[in-house]
Amino acid sequence: MRELLGAGFIILGIPFFIASTLGLLRFPDVYARLHALTKADNVGLGLICLGLAVQANSIAVALKIVLIWGLILLASSTGATLIASSALRHGSAPRRRSDKDTHADR
């Protein structure tokens, strides 16, 4: 039963990675791309880590998996902040709504 539940969480995490990859490829600026990567990847990784923790043979292994997820959350948020600060410092302004944006009001 644990294997099935763990596999379910892992399978639920995969679409979040796919969504973040699509966001990286399709979003217009560095800030939107960072948002897609940090949010969706962290949720996807959390579900996958949860699935692996459920399948773990001991509590110690499950806690190590959760600790790894927490460290990756910390590293990804720090990295995204540094990338966004660097982009802003080098003149990459966030995209603003304009007349050309046909989907802004939806």
Image (tube, rainbow, N blue to C red):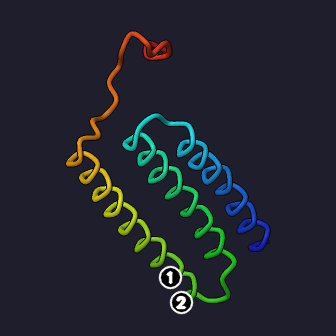
Rendering coords of residue 76 (x, y %): 40, 63
Graded by Cα atoms within 10 Å as few (under 14), some (14 to 19) or many (20 or more), the crowding at tag 1 reads few
- Label 1, label 2: how many angstroms apart (C-alpha)? 5 Å
Q: Who is closer to the viewer here, 105 or 90?
A: 90
Quadrant location of residue 99?
Answer: top left
Instruction: Look at mark 2 in the image and give the residue it sits on.
Output: 60
Tell me what residue is drawn at x 59 percent, y 61 percent.
47
Q: Determine whether label 1 and label 2 are within 8 Å by CB.
A: yes
Instruction: Look at mark 1 in the image and give the residue it sits on.
Output: 63
Rendering coords of residue 39 (x, y %): 46, 50
Rendering coords of residue 23 (x, y %): 54, 42
Q: Who is closer to the viewer here, 18 or 42?
A: 18
Q: Residue furthest front?
A: 90
Rendering coords of residue 97 (x, y %): 35, 19
Graded by Cα atoms within 10 Å as few (under 14), some (14 to 19) or many (20 or more), the crowding at tag 2 reads few
| Element marked by disc 1 | helix
Q: Is residue 9 left or right of residue 92?
A: right
Tell me what residue is drawn at x 45 percent, y 78 percent.
67
Question: Measured along the vertical axis of the image, is residue 45 above or below residue 60?
Answer: above
Question: Measured along the vertical axis of the image, is residue 90 above or below residue 9?
Answer: above
Tell me what residue is drawn at x 36 percent, y 15 percent.
98
Q: Residue furthest left?
A: 89
Tell me what residue is drawn at x 64 percent, y 57 percent.
13
